[in-house]
Image (cartoon, rainbow, N blue to C red):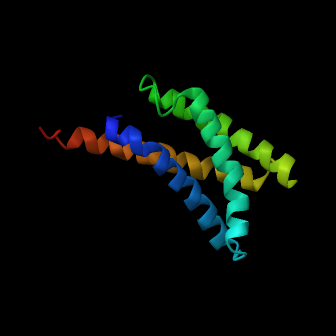
Amino acid sequence: MTGRLRTAAPVVDLVCLVLFVLIGGGRHDISDGAGWFLGVLWPLALGWFVVAVATKLYTNPARPWLRLTGTWALGLTLALVVRGIVLGRQPVGTFALVLFAFVALETFGWRLIALLFRRRVPARA
């Protein structure tokens, strides 16, 4: 991952989590405002970014797919545990399955698209 893309990666990943919450809220006709939105988002962001720091997802360019996989698996698991403890939500079930699938598609997907685009478009001098 190039320097500029590595710098943008945490922001793009946060956008992926935000999209998950917004789309989920829309699919379930939830319109309880910012409180609901932040209540769903904060455990996801906390779990993701705590593990991203531990795996050095954004700072170490070696084995980026392995670091992403670890962040995805452990970060979302941590998010579900926090969500269960703090908010009293069931950590397993349909929400967890959709969360893992959707976030995998988003976070692995944008990186794959960026990689393919970078290989296709020559670097500028």
Q: Nearer the viewer, residue 106 or 47?
A: 47
Q: Quadrant location of residue 37?
A: bottom right
Q: Residue at x 72, y 39 (%)?
A: 77
Relative image position of residue 36 (x, y in whole percent): 73, 67
Relative to 123, residue 54 above or below: above
Find the residue positioned furthest to the top.
Answer: 62
Q: Is residue 88 above or below residue 28?
A: above
Q: Residue at x 57, y 27 (%)?
A: 55
Examine the rendering and report whether any part of residue 89 can be seen.
no
Q: Which residue of the protein is positioned furthest toward the left in this rendering?
A: 125
Q: Residue 47 location in percent, x, y?
A: 68, 42
State the image coordinates of residue 23 (x, y, percent, origin top left).
Answer: 60, 66
The answer to whether residue 11 of the structure is visible from this angle is yes
Q: Position of residue 15 (x, y in %)?
A: 51, 55
Residue at point 73%, 60% (across, down): 39
The C terminus: image quadrant: top left
Residue in view at x 73 percent, y 39 percent = 78
- Image quadrant for the N terminus? top left
- Quadrant in which residue 112 is drawn: top left
Say above or below: 6 vs 17: above
